[in-house]
Amino acid sequence: MADVLLETKGLHRFFGGLHAVNDVSIAVTQGAIKGVIGPNGAGKTTLFNLIAGTIQPHNGEVIFRDKKITALKPHAVACRGIARTFQTTKLFSHMTVLENVMMGRHCRTQCGFISGMLNLPRTWREDKQTREKALSILKDLGLAEYAFETASNLPFGRQRLVEFARALAMEPQLLLLDEPAAGLNIYETKELARLILWIRDRGVTCLVVEHDMSLVMAICDDVVVLDQGQKIAEGPPRAVQRNPEVIRIYLGDSDA
Amino acid sequence: MTHLRRYIPVIAVALGVIILQVVLSGTRSTYYMTQLTMSAYYALVVIGLCLLMGYAGQISLGHAGFFAIGGYTTAVLTTFNLMAYRDTPLVSLCRSLGVVVQRQDIYGADILAFSPWPAFIVAILLTVIIAFMIGLPVIRLKGHYMAMASLGFGLIIYRIVLGGRIFGQADGISNIPPFKIIDGLEVNGRAAFRVESYYIAWFVVLAAMTLAINLVHSRVGRALRSIHENEEAAHSLGVNTYRYKLFVFVLSALFAAVGGVLLTHYNGSIGPSEVTVTKSVRYLVIVAVGGMANLWGALFMGIILNFLSLRGVFGSYDDAVFAIILIAIMLFAPEGLLRLPRLRAKSPLPSGGTNG
């Protein structure tokens, strides 16, 4: 049994009267790709936001590398080694692609206000390293030619890749991908599947919220199914696919 | 050495400043230098506000308040007569350290007051503390709410100044001594010191510009811009957004206070007109017309508009001119005020960045 990298224990979150996440406990194995699926409004993104610290759970805890990260703010969670991408790509649209990816190095660099204002040698040495690292990641993802382009000028699919590059620049242990295939065509989705597998092979554990079943079946080692805030199934993709409960929520009752 | 390219405009402006002085002295019109010096100090406020608004995207309508905290602190300390406390141990000690000095006021009476350097240091520390305390709650607010809160702060400072006897109420404080920075170099409004004071002011402005330019090109500058663009994404990348916004708020207040202190010593006086909301609006307008995330634009607009205003070109329509500019921006470039079009710092990247 491989190590557990991330674990949630009995997470609860309400939005007014809505029980958006109801007693969800999941475990993500180091080096695995875990999928989170479920119909719209099942609480998938809320679960992500709870893990990333964007919102706080009303009950339960999140454990990352054996340490509790439940009450931490998003920036602290990020610096612990959890990167994320967003359902709707959130690039810094007026900044260049390179600057976007350089932002991913924020936690891995140190220079503050004073050394920045004085432009000390260590400031520009660090900046040079940041730039080189960012360029090499862009190269890995085939985005080198766009480095000096303003982010918002890129086509949608490329923007999503830049968001991946930015997240990878953090050198995270865990990558949270919120519907990475949303809005991509079949070809781009296949490319994305290869990319996620490649990221996993570089040692980054992935947790993927996804609607696209073909993608989930192709890449995930393990899938958890949410419906109305509750976990209703968990296991290898093939087994989950045959689970009658899962078929019911996706296709409806046979006697409906 | 691409990162040195950003200093070219600094050197160019420095040369321009020298040429202007030579021309003005040559044509016997050195009186223009007085307004150029004053404009330079106002430009310090604008540079700080440009960092806060243009880069970090946080609106402040209270920066005249920070300017006043700087100016009034030094004004009070350097004019409050300690003669009555002459024999107390504390005052004697300060006197022997040179922190408190004896001088004559304009009527020839002896007064005992703090000398400008310690007053300057106290003014700066006080501004940092107040900006920090105001910033703690205000920075949590977003957009218009932050603008309103900072406006409230500005109004409070205005009322304190207007109501406080120690601040001279509506008359303000006068008879403030010149600021001798080192022997033979002083910020002094008298005609004999005009050229000297002009160079000091511009040295300070260009130093501030250099610090600001370095900052916007650094890791911190990138983080500030990222907060402006998408706070949630910045947060998710590990940027402590609250802390960065607070720090840049304090920094911009600091710039304003330095301007306030030096201008007060230059003018020899300060009054409540420096603290009005229209002054705060004026700074904001200048940053907006300068192009928001554009330090040089803010500097040039700051110098030009303040110079014209101080020369009396706008006459009694002074505040109206700035209001009209503000309305025009809102009408024709509202993006420029709340959500700016050009966030990209002019990057020194295009060549030499990749070939190491």
Image (cartoon, rainbow, N blue to C red):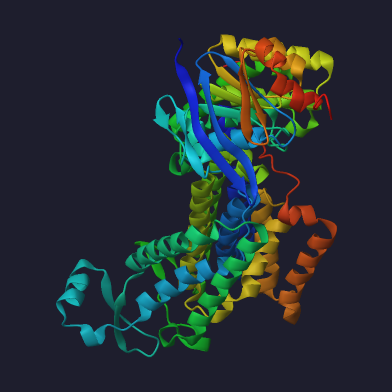
Above or below: residue A191 compared with residue B169: above
Q: Quadrant of residue B227?
A: top right
Left or right of B116? Residue B227 is right
Q: Quadrant of residue B76?
A: bottom left
Q: Nearer the viewer, residue B104 or A63?
A: A63
Residue B75, compared with residue B85, is above or below; it is above
In the image, residue A136 above or below residue A62: above
Q: Would you say residue B219 is visible in this rendering?
A: no
Residue A156 shows up from this direction: yes
Q: Position of residue B66 (x, y in %)?
A: 51, 67
Tell me the quadrant of the picture where the N terminus of chain B can be found: top right
Number of dots carrying numbers: 0
Camera-nearest residue between A146 and A52: A52
Q: Check the image and name the residue furthest to the front.
A: A255
Q: Nearer the viewer, residue A189 or B315?
A: A189
In the picture, measured across the screen, residue A80 lies left or right of residue B343, that is left
Query: Residue drawn 68% across and 61% down?
Result: B286
Please provide percent x and percent y for residue A63.
Answer: 45, 30
In this rendering, the answer to whether A95 lies above or below B185 is above
The picture places residue B11, in percent across and down from the top left corner, at 58, 43
Q: Quadrant of residue A49?
A: top right
Foreground of the two, A45 or B307: A45
Q: Residue at position x 66%, y 57% from top? A: B143
Residue drawn at 60 percent across, 46 percent down: A14
**Does residue A222 appear to the left or right of B247 in the view shown?**
right
Residue B136 position, x and y percent, is: 48, 58
User: Which quadrant: the C terminus of chain B?
Assistant: top right
